[in-house]
Amino acid sequence: MSPTPVILDMDPGHDDAIAMLVALGSPALEVVGITTVAGNQTLARTTRNACRVLTVAGARGLEVAAGADRPLVRDQVLAADIHGESGLDGPILPDPRVAVAEEPAVLHMARLLRAARAPVTLIPTGPLTNVALLLRLFPELAGRIREIVWMGGSTREGNVTPAAEFNAFADPEAAHVVFTAGVALRMVGLNLTHQAVATPDVVERIAALPGPVPRLVVDLLEFFTASYRRVFAMPAPPVHDACAVAAVIDPGLVTSVPAHVAVELGGRHTYGATVVDRGGARPANCQVAVELDRSGFWDLVTAALARL
Ligand code: RIB
Ligand code: CA
């Protein structure tokens, strides 16, 4: 079976970096493009981080296209408390040897969608600003998108406010555009990603793999673990973004259900919440991931990292 063409739209970010490496190490995917968006850190930093991770991965022929440097409407929020001032604090990373594309992310995505041999799966793992702009500027390209598989939102509590998850909270209006666009969409929210916690036994398994990429992932997880202990009093971190990539690599790993999801844009206390209605009162506009095959997930992650 030919690999699925995918575009990664990211805000590296420790878990974005791991997700990128898992995607690059999986023969089931053909990463045709990587774009960046402001989110965990500023656009300049997320873009530099994407280029640095790609440099370690030794990816050939890929460039990074930088996208939106701020949300569509709201004030900018970052996540330096989790990812540090660089957005990828902890590991010692090489200076990037990967080019930043001349064209902005939205034009890069549009060109890739037109040129792709088959409809492309978009895997956004940050705020949906770039994807919303793409859908608004090029609605005719919706048919060239096989599916959007987004790490974001939650069927239950948030992680920035009690109601809102970071990627949704950082640009709720963009999320609203995507959830109302009528494009095939899977929401991989906190309720799913908190089933993918990088416990010490997982870290040991990755540390046993040879080469610079597993080493980088162990260093990323060391910093990410410390952040999650300090900020959330969690003993180990959920590797959120890798869940969205794994859901595309092996859809059987993630059970999803149809639901209507609305993004709260007006609530004083609930702004950015993804309000999930599985009751059928309103027609489903997406698939919501609810159950992860944990052992299958970590098998997939370690196998992908071992290939790089
Ligand atoms: O809420 C988790 C999400 O926010 C992840 O994508 C993480 O990288 C941050 O962007
Ligand atoms: Ca992210």
Image (tube, helix red, strand yellow):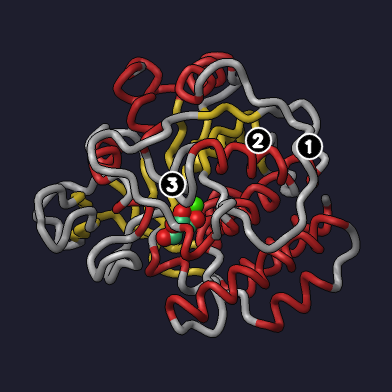
Mark 2 lies on residue: 31
Q: Residue at x 51, y 26 (%)?
A: 119
- Circles 1 and 3, Cβ within 8 Å, touching? The answer is no
Q: Name above or below for residue 280 compared with residue 135.
A: below
- Of badges 2 and 1, the one in the foreground is 1
Mark 1 lies on residue: 59
> At which x and y percent is residue 59?
78, 37
Query: Is residue 288 found left or right of 292 in the rendered image?
Result: left
Q: Quadrant of the N terminus?
A: top right
- Circles 2 and 1, Cβ within 8 Å, touching? The answer is yes
- Of badges 2 and 3, the one in the foreground is 3
Which badge, 1 or 3, is on the more N-terminal residue?
3
Q: Residues within 10 Å of mark 3 (few under 14, many from 20)?
A: many
Which mark identifies residue 39? 3
Tell me the quarter of the picture where residue 134 sits: top left
Which badge, 2 or 1, is on the more N-terminal residue?
2
Task: Estimate the spatial distance between the alpha carbons at disc 2 and disc 3, rounded to whole Å.
Answer: 21 Å
Q: Residues within 10 Å of mark 2 (few under 14, many from 20)?
A: many
Which mark identifies residue 256? none
**Does dot 1 land on a helix, a strand or a loop?**
loop
> At which x and y percent is residue 81?
47, 64
Tell me the quarter of the picture where residue 88 sits: bottom right
In the rendered picture of this protein, how many numbered marks are placed on residues?
Answer: 3
Which badge, 2 or 3, is on the more N-terminal residue?
2
Classify mark 3 as within 8 Å of ligand 1 or not, answering yes or no.
Answer: yes
The amino acid type found where label 2 is placed reads Val
The amino acid type found where label 3 is placed reads Gly
The amino acid type found where label 1 is placed reads Ala
- Circles 2 and 3, Cβ within 8 Å, touching? The answer is no
Residue lying furthest right: 210
**Does dot 2 land on a helix, a strand or a loop?**
strand
